[in-house]
Amino acid sequence: MPTALRIIAIVIATVIEVFFLLWFLLPIRYRIFKAGNMLGVLICLIALFRTAFSTLYHQLDAYMLQNTFTKIVWLIIKYGCVLFVIYAIVVSICMIIAMKRKPKKNATAVVLGAQVKPWGASRLLKQRIKAAETYLDQNPDVKAIASGGQGANEPMSEAACIYVNMVKDGVNAERILIEDQSVNTEQNLLYSVKLIKESHLGDDIAIVSDSYHQLRARIIAYKIDRKLCVGAINTVNTRFGWFIYPSFFVREWIAIPVEIVKKLGRPARHRKF
């Protein structure tokens, strides 16, 4: 590559890396220390070192290749980074496909719970409620499952909060079923599917959650019952949601493989609804 083009490419790459580094650091200002933003910061720092400080990188590369032990360690690190980048790209593509998957006609909406504050629904939960209401308005024959138990620091169950807000906004109470025993996403879906089966609502469901969460939720749903046809109803981020989105998106790179290998209650063949 000609020197001038190489310099331009380095400058562009450096600007992009600094931009994302600051984006991943921003949640820390709001005391958000999650695996996603910490991993994002680490990735950006490594990429920045490779591009903006290429001279130091090549010096380190030459030093690490001087003897057998450091060479092996260095090659493991280098190829490990390459494999991780490939993995991240593949998972990200799968996440995008999952979030774009439209639900079947009249699929039952499963509204996943989120934290309830002392004054009411959190911003995250409000987004899910609004997304569910829009879906129900567009599909008048659809019912919804309000899912989520009550945490120690919550004034009411997440399901009750979803129900109260949806009814207040004009949704017919008879269209909302309540599942208020779950404490995590896994149980949200497990108990909601059980309620759907008991209510004879079919195998088509629409998971109402954040877009980055859809793939993991889909994996959990299929672990519960492979007959389910799962669609996505994504929340619309508010003007305050943009700064944490990359952190939660990257967090899913860690959570998804963990979810794949994790067992879900009893084996599917022994689970009865």
Image (tube, grey):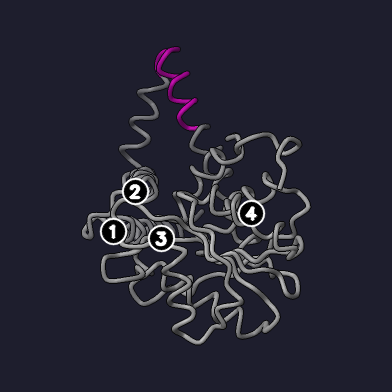
| N-terminal label among 1 and 2 | 1
Q: Nearer the viewer, residue 241 or 205?
A: 205
Asked which quadrant contains residue 61, the reply is: top left
Asked which quadrant contains residue 168, the reply is: bottom left
Q: Secondary structure at mark 4?
A: helix
Q: Nearer the viewer, residue 62 or 162?
A: 162
For the residues labelled 2 and 3, the Cα–Cα distance comes to: 24 Å
Identify the amino acid type marked 2.
Lys
Can you identify the residue that label 2 sits on?
34
| N-terminal label among 1 and 3 | 1
Q: Please say if the residues under marks 1 and 2 sit with CB atoms less than 8 Å apart.
A: yes
Q: Which residues are magenta?
A: 66-78
From the top left corner, tell me how far across and down residue 175 is, in percent: 61, 76
Question: Please, what is the dominant secondary structure of the magenta stretch?
Answer: helix
For the residues labelled 1 and 2, the Cα–Cα distance comes to: 9 Å
Q: Which of the two marks, 4 or 2, is nearer to us in this view? A: 4
Identify the amino acid type marked 3.
Ser
Q: Which mark is residue 27?
A: 1
| N-terminal label among 2 and 3 | 2
Q: Please say if the residues under marks 1 and 3 sit with CB atoms less than 8 Å apart.
A: no
Can you identify the residue that label 4 sits on?
218
